Image (cartoon, rainbow, N blue to C red):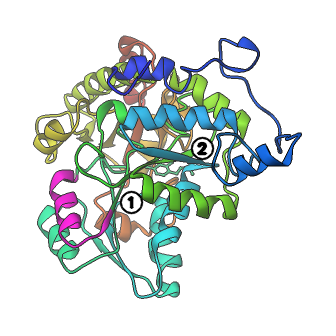
Amino acid sequence: MSLEKQQPSTIAAWGGEERPLAFGAAQVPIVQSAPFVYDDVDSWLDVALGRAEGHIYSRNTNPTVGVFEEKLRLLEGAEDATSFATGMAAISNTLFTFLRPGDRVVSITDSYGGTSKIFLDFLPPMGVEVELVETGNDEALEAAIAKGARIVYLETPTNPTLKIIDLPRAIAAAKAVGAISVIDNTFATPINQRPLDLGADLVLHSATKFLGGHDDAMGGVLAGRRELVRQVYHYREITGATLSAFGAYLLLRGMKTLDLRVRRQNETALAIARYLAAHPKVDQVFYPGLEDHPGHAVAAAQMTGFGGVLSFSLHGDFDATKRCLKAVKLAHRAASLGSVNTLIGIPATTSHVECSAAERAHLGIPETLIRYSCGIEAFDDLRDDLETALAAV
Ligand SMILES: *Cc1c(COP(=O)(O)O)cnc(C)c1O
């Protein structure tokens, strides 16, 4: 059975699991073994030299991890995929595989915090030039890419103010200068956005977020053109930032419901965004599904859903934000997103805690900003909870 042409919910359930599994198990076994055993040298050699399929050592490949990679490969419509211990391992291994002294990277100012650290603190001392363009300014991005780049690294929607980058436009600019385009698709998920279909070379995820979806496992994954993915795989074999079999199992179990969860989270986030936009205590709401969001038209063109994360700012000061957060009952106050449980956090104390107030202002992050990642709870209950919390402000 080929799953390439099946719909995402079918791939989520069956992807990578078409072949009979060990012991006739109906679900993917956790193959908790470091090495794999060979009784004769010839078949060992065949696998080691890539002439036959099999596994040698779990830092390189592992059957449970392989199923996770295959499921994501199918969901993103990629030629190949490889996985990592965390999302940051996926990002750092990908960047360090391709970048050499003298190379240039073009990205945006609103990248995920850890990614920004690589751009600002790690790459420049290695002799890599980094140009970060104001997020959402598609002309400036195009112009920066036109000056040449080894890697164009983008993320959309962005954290925490859900800005939108015009992907087809930026990817076309990257192609014109022979740059490798890499898209962090964590916020969108392959259910809402498939960057490879829009022409990107590589797409990556923090699987810790929506892919796993239960806040109980960490992982990262990269998918795209085979020749590029293989190079990153070989680098990761040596750096050892490998996903564990148990981690892969948890992520796989979560991914079976990816399509169901994300559709529900899309719906809830839009309804919550509309509710908040009409609330007198709320100043601004950031959600690309709202018609007055500056990136709405581009998002509607390149996404099939607007995602489960939104953010909003309150009238008042930081104390108002603290009171609101304290009063919320149906949300974990925690630094993640994309879980079945609603998560709430303040960028000023989490993802952007290392920025000064002036730097946050420059990035367009209000001091009273609250990030809200919708879980799978009922909309009415979440709305009532927010109503009570906002009354406490
Ligand atoms: C969380 C996150 C990462 C980093 O992933 P980890 O699994 O925490 O290492 C990268 N990009 C985005 C957009 C994220 O939200």
Q: What element carries label 1?
A: loop
Give the percent coordinates (x, y) of residue 189: 38, 36
Q: What stretch is highlighted in magenta?
A: 165-180
Q: Which amino acid type is marked by label 2?
A: Gly
Quadrant in which the C terminus appears = top left
Q: What crowding class fits label 2: few (fewer than 14 Cα within 10 Å), some (14-19), or many (20 or more)?
A: many
Q: Which residue is drawn at 17% across and 52% down?
A: 168
Q: Does the magenta stretch include residue 341?
A: no
- Ligand 1 lies under 8 Å from the Cβ of mark 1: yes
Q: Mark 1 points at which residue?
A: 111
Q: Which residue is drawn at 41% across and 35% down?
A: 372
153 displayed left or right of 146: right
Q: Does the magenta stretch include residue 169?
A: yes
Q: Which amino acid type is marked by label 1?
A: Ser
Give the percent coordinates (x, y) of residue 242: 67, 51
Give the percent coordinates (x, y) of residue 355: 45, 67
Q: Mark 2 points at which residue?
A: 219
As measured in the structure, the alpha-carbon distance from the residue carrying label 1 to the one carrying label 2 is 19 Å
Quadrant in which the N terminus appears = top left
- Residue depth check, mark 1 versus mark 2: number of the one nearer the observer: 2
Is 4 drawn above or below residue 202 in the view shown? above
